[in-house]
Image (tube, rainbow, N blue to C red):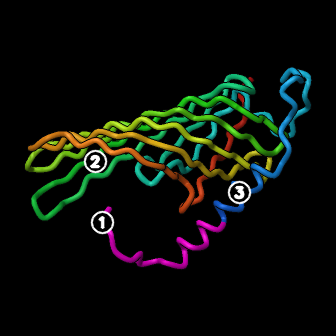
Amino acid sequence: MGGGASPYPGRRRIAGTLAAAVLFLGLAVPAEPAAVPLDTVERGVDTVGRWGVGYSTAEAPLGFRYQWSRRYGVDLGLGFRSSEASGGRETRVVLDGGFLYALAPGERVNVFARPGVQFRNLDQEDGSTTTIRLSGALDVEVFVTERMSLGARAGVRIQTTSPPEGPNRTDFGTRHDRFAEAGFHFYLDNPR
């Protein structure tokens, strides 16, 4: 997206404040002691074997989360847009995935290390632009009910962009998803 002022500056401020509060709560809540086996700790919200569906990132808004144990899981995101642009039809596809490792699984708060990869392709009349992004992030998930969680994510990323013409471009920097826009997951019932 281009620069310039946001048409909704109040929403950005509110969402940023909410995301900062979620991150603060995630860091303020004490984690389970590492010496205690995960199977012996009572847990308020059990997400093992349940799919979480919700908002992931602005580029891949349709998000899915699944944990096969209290310690391990995956995040998946999908984005698609096809529209008429000044130069013809423009189609964008984004696939995002990450591996979740629970650093501090808690009763209402989970803190994950999340290495991830994202693939973006933008098809335009003059050719395709492909971007591959590798990232490492700290992901905090706070449960507001038994089925609904809010989240924030921050970390680092490196990405390579291949335009239709000219040399590839590589960028490195910090990343923040769901920080200016609060993310969420709604967990479905476990079929077991």
Element class at badge 1: loop
The quadrant the N terminus occupies is bottom left
Q: Give the magenta-colored segment's residue range.
A: 1-17
- Count of marks, rendered view: 3
Give left or right: position of 70 versus 60: right
Element class at badge 3: helix
Please rate how many residues cluster around mark 2, counting C-alpha atoms within 10 Å: few if below 14, some from 14 to 19, many from 20: some
- Tell which circle, 3 or 2, labels the residue nearer the N-terminal end: 3
- Report which quarter residue 158 is drawn in: top left
- Report which quarter residue 44 is drawn in: top right
- Kind of residue at badge 2: Arg
Q: Nearer the viewer, residue 169 or 66?
A: 169
* Residue 2 lies within the magenta run: yes
Label drawn at residue 11: none
| Residue depicted at x 91% and y 32% | 42
- Tell which circle, 2 or 1, labels the residue nearer the N-terminal end: 1
- Kind of residue at badge 1: Gly
Q: Which residue is mark 3?
A: 22
| Residue depicted at x 54% and y 79% | 10
- Tell which circle, 1 or 3, labels the residue nearer the N-terminal end: 1
Q: Which residue is mark 2?
A: 92
Up-down relation of residue 112 to residue 177 (above or below): above
| Residue depicted at x 56% and y 29% | 99
Residue 124 at x, y percent in the picture: 15, 49
